[in-house]
Amino acid sequence: MNWFKKIFGLGLPCLFHSLTGLYCPGCGGTRAVRSLLRGDLRMSFQYHPLVLYAVLVLFLEMILRAFKGRKTPLDHKKRARILILAGAAIVAANWIFKNYMLVFKGVDLLPLMK
């Protein structure tokens, strides 16, 4: 189990953040997954809300498929398009908000994990 901790304990530095001092749209994603795996939903959301959104969408899709049976491809395509656009909106809003808080308020919303 020690090897597992060594592999997943490593985090790759963000090149965009290293060069600009700003967060990229994906900054915090790895920490969000790690927090989610530890059961810390609040920190997972704070690190990157897209991770919890993706888990929720996956769970709801599994339920829909289990109870609906066969559906028309159009229904699936419409729902997928809406879910993807919602995910993109979450990424954009998260990116803007975290950089706003960092630049204008001096608040770092992506603290290092313990």
Image: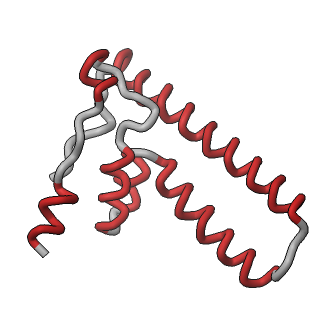
Asked where in the image residue 74 lies, by quadrant, the reply is: bottom right
The image shows residue 66 at horizontal and vertical percentages of: 72, 83
Q: Residue at x 41, y 24 (%)?
A: 99
Front residue of 65/44: it is 65
Left/right of residue 8 with respect to residue 49 in the rendered view: left
Q: Residue at x 43, y 21 (%)?
A: 100
Left/right of residue 100 with respect to residue 108 in the rendered view: right
Left/right of residue 94 with respect to residue 99 in the rendered view: right
Tally of numbered discs:
0
The image shows residue 79 at horizontal and vertical percentages of: 79, 56
Asked where in the image residue 2 lies, by quadrant, the reply is: bottom left
**Extreme residue toward the left, this view:** 2
Of the 4 image quadrants, the one containing the N terminus is bottom left
Front residue of 49/69: it is 69
Left/right of residue 104 with respect to residue 78 in the rendered view: left
The image shows residue 56 at horizontal and vertical percentages of: 58, 64
Q: Residue at x 38, y 46 (%)?
A: 29
The image shows residue 45 at horizontal and vertical percentages of: 43, 51
Q: Residue at x 36, y 52 (%)?
A: 32
Above or below residue 74? Residue 71 is below
Above or below residue 97? Residue 2 is below
- Which color scheme did the rendering employ for the protein? secondary structure
Front residue of 58/109: it is 58
